[in-house]
Amino acid sequence: MSAAPVKRVTVPALRAMKSQQRIGVLTAYDFPSAKIADAAGTDVILVGDSLGMVVLGYPDTLSVTVEDMLHHTRAVARGVTRALVVGDMPYLSYHVSIEESVRNAGRFIQAGAQAVKVEGGKPSRIRTIEAILDAEVPVMGHIGLTPQSVNAIGGFKLQGKNAEDARRLIEEAEALDRAGCFALVLECVPAELAAFITGRISIPTIGIGAGPRCDGQVLVLHDLLGLYQGTSPKFVRKYADLGAEMQSALEHYLRDVREGTFPTEAESFHGTSEEELKRLYGSCDSEGIVVEIQAKS
Ligand code: KIV
């Protein structure tokens, strides 16, 4: 008897979670980590452009291309059976023209994502998002600290600190809700502002550095597992130190290789009979070790 099919998290199902249950979101960038995150029960896997920093080694997300993102989205999609897969549209993939933005968004769906994420909420961005939605691609919004705007905002800093900025973020959140986004990431904003926005809009808010009163939370996988060697912001909780564990395992392996304790006999194959070895090399001792290397023609 085969196991019952897993019920997939869909865009409408995620939307309906608002005020019903807290939403857990993780990033993932490859097949094995997506498989593990899915088995752990994450509701959403975001193939974030944070991959530029935590996987590809760039200082920010601006160098990540659509091709990079699609390559990783395909790998993630192959590992997921339950979670909603959201592909993060990278810098310049939705900034040049509406037509190009829609085409790029569609490529994420063809790569196996069920939705895309787009940063920003100004009026021109809302028009782009409406066009993407019109092409049947669900959109997750993202406001507050939007890393693709790092040069314009002058660094990775808390947003919405003064009344004017906070009011702008509230207006953007409402505009993204009205446009038809199915969820909204709030990154690095005061907890009170995130709580206010969460109460004000109809779609789930997913916080990162936005306090506990969002409808869900997202963390970058490499931050929470201790796999990212750079400095992590204060909102990151490290649930494991896999970087240190990985290094110690690798040091152990290299020690074994150098000391000759890896591989053992049990870790080696012994399929060739003495007779076959003799046919190949000429002669063998009783343990099958070649004593006279002389390949027969
Ligand atoms: O790229 C990313 O991982 C993100 C999340 C931090 C929200 O945008």
Image: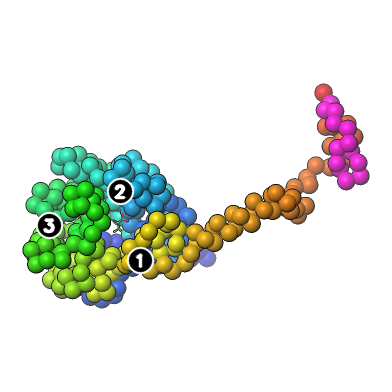
Please tell me whether mark 1 sits on a helix, a strand or a loop: loop
The answer to whether residue 288 is magenta is yes
Cα separation, mark 2 vs mark 3, equals 26 Å
Our reading of the magenta stretch's main secondary structure is loop
Residue positioned 85% across, 41% down in the render: 289
- Read off the magenta span: 284-296
**Mark positioned earlier in the residue sequence (1 or 3):** 3
**Residue 97 pos. (x, y %):** 15, 40
Disc 3 marks which residue? 179
Cα separation, mark 1 vs mark 3, equals 31 Å
**Residue 271 pos. (x, y %):** 78, 45
Disc 2 marks which residue? 61
Q: Report the mark closest to the observer, 1 or 3.
A: 1
Bin the neighbour count of mark 3 within 10 Å (Cα to Cα): few under 14, some 14-19, many 20 and up: some
**Mark positioned earlier in the residue sequence (1 or 2):** 2
Q: Residue most toward the right?
A: 286
